[in-house]
C-alpha cells in the first residue's frame, strides 16, 4: 500500500478491500493513508472521524463518504482539474 494518494486515485487505492466491510477494517487497512489535498494532506482516519457510517458495501461507497467529509476547499478551485497549470 502507498503512503499517500491524490484524491483522484482514492477509488483505486481502496479497491482491494473485501467488500462489504466495516469501518474498523477500513481504519486498520487505510487509516494512515494520507490523501493529498489542494491545501495539504489528511489521513483517511481523520476524515472518517466525523462520519457515523460503520459499514461500506463498495469502494465507491467508502470514497463517497470520504469526499463527503472533506472541506470544500480541499479539492481545489471550482472547475479546475488536477492537470491544469
Image: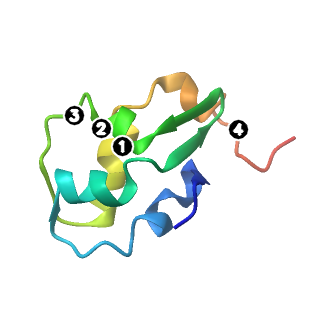
- Please report contact status of discs 1 and 2: CB closer than 8 Å, yes or no: yes
15 sits left or right of 8 in the view: left
| Location of mark 4 (residue) | 80
**Residue 41 picture location, percent across and down:** 58, 34
Mark found first going from the N terminus, 1 or 2: 2
Crowd band around label 4 with a 10 angstrom C-alpha radius: few (<14), some (14–19), many (20+): few
Q: Are marks 3 and 1 in contact (CB under 8 Å)?
A: no
Labels 2 & 3 near each other (Cβ < 8 A) = yes
Distance between mark 4 and mark 1 Cα atoms = 20 Å
Q: Nearer the viewer, mark 2 or mark 4?
A: 2
List the residue tagged with mark 3.
51
Crowdedness near tag 2: few (<14), some (14–19) or many (≥20) residues, C-alpha within 10 Å: many
Q: Earlier in the sequence, mark 4 or mark 3?
A: 3
Q: Residues within 10 Å of mark 1 (few under 14, many from 20)?
A: many
Q: Secondary structure at mark 3?
A: loop
Residue under the point 57% across and 63% down = 2
Name the residue rendered at 44%, 47% in the picture.
32
Q: Earlier in the sequence, mark 4 or mark 1?
A: 1
Residue marked by disc 1: 66
In the image, is 49 to the left or to the right of 14? left
Choose between 75 and 40: the one closer to the eye: 40
Residue on which the image places disc 2: 48
Disc nearer the start of the sequence (3/1): 3
* Residue located 19% across and 51% down the image: 23
Quadrant that contains the C terminus: top right
Q: Name the element at disc 1.
A: helix
Amino acid at each position: 500500500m502507498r503512503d499517500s494518494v491524490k484524491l483522484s486515485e482514492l477509488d483505486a487505492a481502496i479497491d482491494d478491500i473485501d467488500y462489504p466491510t466495516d469501518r474498523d477494517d477500513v481504519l486498520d487497512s487505510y487509516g494512515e493513508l494520507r490523501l493529498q489535498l489542494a491545501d495539504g494532506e489528511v489521513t483517511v482516519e481523520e476524515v472518517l472521524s466525523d462520519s457515523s457510517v460503520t459499514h461500506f458495501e463498495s469502494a465507491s461507497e467508502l470514497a463517497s463518504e470520504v469526499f463527503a467529509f472533506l472541506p470544500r476547499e480541499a479539492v481545489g478551485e471550482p472547475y479546475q482539474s488536477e492537470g491544469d497549470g
